[in-house]
Amino acid sequence: MYNILIIDDEPIVIEAQVAHLRRDGSFNVSIEESGEQGMKYIEKNRNAIDLILLDIWLEDESYGLDLIPKISELTNALIVILSSSNDTAEKVQALEYGCIDYITRDELYSPKMTLLKIKNLLKAYPNSQYLFNFKGTQEVYINNKKLTLKPPYIQILKILYESSDAVDAKTLLPHTNQTRWGGEERDPALRIVADYVNVIKKAIKVVAPTYDPIEYFRPANASAYASWRFNRE
């Protein structure tokens, strides 16, 4: 179930869209009618929002684009701009500010099309709601929730998180506190690192039960090492 926040001062305009989203059964929908109310809602529910539909102009004179950086400081939710304008320059500006897409009022009158666009965005960015924050190698948080991990485990998680490629057991092994193994044998290295990765995966599950971003890769041949990769898809 996805959580969607709509910030729009004309709820009657989006009434059909809200009803369509709720009937679909995949979304919880909340509505705020001003920039100020929207920001208060986000501050209170920052870790529970998957996508925000944000009107570009609001009655309290909030300019939607100016709210995007403030919203992004509080939540990793996807931001989609709502506008009555089809102006290309405004669309480009909205994307430059950091929104992920732009929906016009005309498109809102086709609830099915908007629903499909929202579903496709959430499928394309499935892990966008999980924001990691490392405090060196001493502490790590997901959406402001602290993981119960000791520094060697945090170091390995940080290496995986910051690497765009898979990292093998031989590379990760020196960051464990297992100093007695010093040979070239693959099996001991695999067992040691695998134990560390399993502890990390369990710690992530505690704060994000449906989130499993670390993938295991078997070695390509008998002389290679197994590896792990942080999946951002």
Image: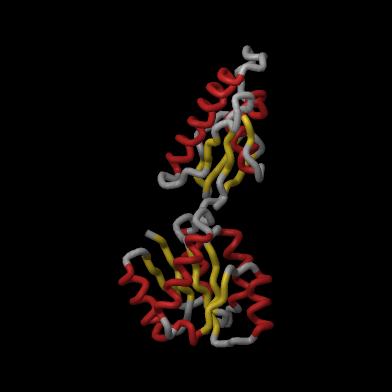
Q: Position of residue 17 (x, y in %)?
A: 39, 78
Instruction: Classify 229 as above or below 87.
Output: above
Question: Which residue ends up furthest to the top in the rendered image?
Answer: 180
Residue at 49% across, 87% down: 106
Residue at 44% across, 73% down: 32
In the displayed structure image, the side of residue 13 where residue 225 appears, left or right: right
Residue at 66% across, 45% down: 164
Instruction: Classify 206 as above or below 112.
Output: above
Instruction: Classify 217 as above or below 125.
Output: above
Instruction: Please name the colour scheme applied to the rendered image.
Output: secondary structure
Give the total number of marks visible in the rendering.
0
Q: Nearer the viewer, residue 21 or 184?
A: 184
Q: Position of residue 218 (x, y in %)?
A: 54, 32
Give the quarter of the figure containing the N terminus: bottom left
Q: Nearer the viewer, residue 12 or 33?
A: 12
In the displayed structure image, the side of residue 91 where residue 25 appears, left or right: left
Quadrant of residue 153 within the rendered picture: top right
Residue at 56% across, 24% down: 190
Q: Position of residue 65 (x, y in %)?
A: 62, 75
Question: Which residue ends up furthest to the front in the rendered image?
Answer: 221
Quadrant of residue 115 within the rendered picture: bottom left
